[in-house]
Image (spheres, rainbow, N blue to C red):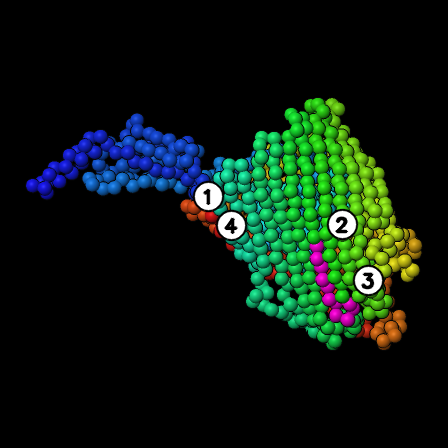
Amino acid sequence: MRKVWWCVALCLIAMSSQADGFKVSGQVFEKGTGRSLQGAQVTVRDLPGSAAESDASGSFEIDLPGYGDFELELRYAGVPLVRAVHLEPGGQVPVQTFYVRLPETLREMVVTAPRSPDRVSKSVISGKTLSSIAGSGGDPLAGLQAMPGVVAVNGSSAPAVRGSGPGDNVYYVDGLVIGKLFHYGSLSVFNADLIEDFNLYSAAFSPHYGDVTGAVIDVALRKPRTDRLGGKVNVSLMGADFLVEGPRNDDQSFYFAARRSYIDLFIKQIEDKGVTIQIPRYWDYQGKYLWNLNDANKLSFHLHGAGDQLALNFSATSNAAIREPVLAGDLSLSDSGASQAVILDSVLSDTTLNTLTLQHRTRDASNRIAQAGTLDLTQESLLLRDQVRLELSAGHELTLGAELGQTKVTVDADLNNTPCTQFDANCDLTTGTREQLRDAFTSRLLAMSVQDRKRVRDDLTLVGGVRYSKEDYLDRSYTEPRVGVEWEWSRDTLLTAGWGRHNQMPTGQQIVRVFGNPGLDHIRADHRVVGIAQRLDADWNWKSEAYYKRFSNLVVSDRTLNYINAASGKAYGLEFLLKKEETDKLSGWFVLNLAKSQRRNDVTGEAFRFEYDEPVNTTLVGRYKLDEDWSFGLKWNYHSGSPYTPVIGTSGNYPDGRFIPRYAGINSGTLPVYHKLDLRADRYMVMDRWKLNAYFELNNVYRRKNIAGYTYNADYSTREEVYTFELPISFGVQGEF
């Protein structure tokens, strides 16, 4: 009887279920991210009136009339998915989970206004675009060399811009001054996935930037994600890194990324012609914690750090040791830096914004240079900066800035001192005078800046500003005006012009006592630039700029004072950029730089080409997106041969018997032209809750042997070509979850 009653009960339940129907529940997520999708429409095919919609958590419920086979059809933003559902008596009703792969144009995007309204001599490009350029190895800063006015520096990603060297630039990241931006191996120290965009100011930049005569590279890192906890793991040819990020609660979010090289774990060292090189080791990390205190105040904490180690050994029979005997033996170089900062962004009123920054930086360097000596250096800096933006009226903005900084330096040096600059052809370290210095000193900085930006007519904006700076180590102060004009000649055409005065402190070696000259003045530069930019349509635009820079107070070596300000220079050129925006499958740009850069020793009267002078430099960058899974890119670069100083014989012997080289005029020789083609393929794979991205690069496809310089035998009677070092391939694989 009990079995009979159970059968009756089951039959009644089944009949009731069939009569009343079933409720089928489900969830809708974005494929690859697992993000909940709200607003997805769910219907049952061939069953009119049956429909449901996913809520904020991606959940939905839909009614089915009874047992049988049904087809659920889901649509989200035009993307359809069909799922077969089979219901039978006594069976479980499964939860239906949909993963929707959205077209790229419909994926979550963050639209932001330009970080700065200034448009004079400014280029803006996203970090994603730069890191996907062929030949970049996934490093956005390497991609900077494909931008207008930028000259590639052999063996480094550090750019030389418009007649200035890499050391003449300044780098800001999230408004923070970053001292160490490149590893010894030329890679930049930042995780490529964190870089939002770059603002490259090539000349006549805002008075809020100081201690720079070359260019300003202003990098913005993106905000941490707030939808869920996730991360990325990336493995490339040179190193591996990870990123973890997500929300802590509704008002707080964070990310932390770290990277380390691993080639040194497999290849300990390489040897070539008597030189043994330990594979360089590097590491870096970045972190950000964002806290929205309330609607008017946002607090962010920033961490940056990077370090490098490099070791070499020159045998006594190597060419380098024969020419410079003090190099025979072991060399070790170690350099690390770190930065911690807190930034408070406040909305003081409807028309007033304030940014208050407190930054702490450290640097530690330790060098052992065989018989030439040792150098240990530590720096600790503290910087307080405040910037207020006032909207006085529509189209009229006033920005006020103030900086107060202090740097403590400790030096312990025991080195052969050979004062040498770009104005010296022969710099013999072996015959240098041995000097010792143990010193600790403090340098303080005060700077104030103001910029007034006013739209005086509907089509005309005038920009004027001034910067006052004072430092107490060299005891120098400067007041420097800067002006700009932006004329919207038509809806699609913009004319710009700018002028500014800038200064920069000489390098540490040049100003420290014993080895340098604490009485030096700052290097000075005047920038002038005019430009035109035109939008042809939604896809195409072009821009051209002409510039002229004049440098003064450049540093030359001096037998009595080590260094003096006694040189000048100039740089001028014309740049052209034609760009195809990323609106469809094809994108890219073409750059043509026509430039001239010179230096002059005002003591001797000798004038010569600047070491980064390339009269013609052109780059073609292209990217074709075959579909959402594959894209292909290329970069072709051609530039005039770089200058070098030829050795034309010898002029006697040093006391130890070595030959003294006799040089032609400084940079009077020209290397053969440089050109190469790089190719790249990107593959994107999307799983339900994670993504896999991979790239492969083939560098210097037609195997061009580009000459970087020459090396000579002991008596300088023969020379051998030195070629640029390039990895033939590069690759990277990234998993995102």
Q: CA distance from mark 2 to mark 3?
A: 19 Å
Mark 1 Cα-neighbour bin, 10 Å: few <14, some 14–19, many ≥20? many
What amino acid does circle 2 point to? Thr
Classify mark 4: helix, strand or loop.
strand
* Residue 3 visible in this rendered orientation of the protein: yes
Marks 2 and 1: which is nearer the front? Answer: 2
Disc on the earlier residue, 3 or 1: 1
Disc on the earlier residue, 2 or 3: 2
Query: Magenta stretch mostly in which secondary structure?
Result: strand
Q: Position of residue 50 (x, y in %)?
A: 30, 29
Instruction: Between residue 429 and residue 81, name the one nearer to us.
Output: 429
Instruction: Report the label total.
Output: 4
Which residue is under mark 1?
33
Classify mark 2: helix, strand or loop.
strand
What amino acid does circle 4 point to? Lys
Which residue is under mark 2?
407
Q: Which residues are magenta?
A: 363-373
Q: CA distance from mark 2 to mark 4?
A: 36 Å
Residue 371 belongs to the span the image colors magenta: yes
